[in-house]
Image (cartoon, coloured by chain):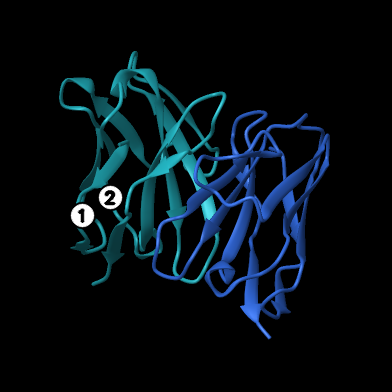
Amino acid sequence: DIQMTQSPSSLSASVGDRVTITCRASQGISNYLAWFQQKPGKAPKSLIYDASTLHGGVPSKFSGSGSGTDFTLTISSLQPEDFATYYCQQYNSYPLTFGGGTKVEIK
Amino acid sequence: EVQLVQSGAEVKKPGESLKISCKGFGYSFASYWIGWVRQMPGKGLEWMGIIYPGDSHTRFSPSFQGQVTISVDKSINTAYLQWGSLKASDTAMYYCARHSTSIPLDSWGQGTLVTVSS
């Protein structure tokens, strides 16, 4: 199985900050990497697929990059509605696997 | 609009059986995989397995193979996740999500909370 490691596991940031979350795959996955946002008590929401393609309706403050084993999710200017937990997932091969999550909290 | 609507919360005793459902609306149900994801209380997301309604082909995570059954009835646009004998450790929120090889897990159900307690 491909292991997905996210860092940090949590971070504190202020409104307006630029935030970067890292996801590393245990082996190369090309660009088959997705990012999800989950707020407490809610279902996950799809943000990005193919490492950098935003789903329709996702604001452009979110961006993704990377290929191979190292990937990043960046939020350019953190807003109150962005405080949530973010997960990466590889879909290069079965079983599909998620990272452990990064909780973004208010400083 | 694409929608996945899951069945309601369940409270069961250890050893009981359970089948939860996920019904798709607003798209060609048979043409997209349906995946199932577990989230234990306070924990992260775990991919359980996936089914293609067109031919009922399934793939499982090794962690869940043999522990659950995934099935589908494409005549009513519904996928199922089933347990034969529940354990307390099956207590979790379970999500279904639409999946394609090009765009993974793009639409999610609202989740079904399963509580297993004696």
Q: Secondary structure at mark 2?
A: loop
Q: Which one is nearer the viewer's eye here, B72 or B86?
A: B72
Q: Residue B82, can we see it?
A: no
x%, y% of residue A75? 70, 60
The residue sitting at the left extreme is B76
Rendering quarter of residue B4: top left
Q: Earlier in the sequence, mark 1 or mark 2?
A: 1
In the displayed structure, B25 sits above or below B28; it is: below
Left or right of residue A100: residue B9? left
Rendering quarter of residue A107: bottom right
In the displayed structure, A68 sits above or below A65; it is: above
Label 1 crowd (10 A; few <14 / some 14-19 / many >=20): few
What residue do we see at 70% from left, 66% from top?
Answer: A77
Rendering quarter of residue A33: top right
Left or right of residue B11: residue B4? right
Label 2 crowd (10 A; few <14 / some 14-19 / many >=20): some
Q: Are marks 1 and 2 in contact (CB under 8 Å)?
A: yes
Give the chain letter at badge 2.
B
- In the figure, the shade used to draw chain B is cyan
Q: Secondary structure at mark 1?
A: loop
- In the figure, the shade used to draw chain A is blue
Residue topped by disc 1: B16
Image quarter where the N terminus of chain B lies is: top left
Q: Residue B8, can we see it?
A: yes
x%, y% of residue B9? 22, 60
- Asked if marks 1 and 2 fall on the same chain, the answer is yes
Give the chain letter at badge 1.
B
Image quarter where the C terminus of chain B lies is: bottom left
The residue sitting at the bottom extreme is A107
Left or right of residue B116: residue B8? left
Residue topped by disc 2: B85
Query: Could you tell me the amino acid type at mark 1?
Result: Glu
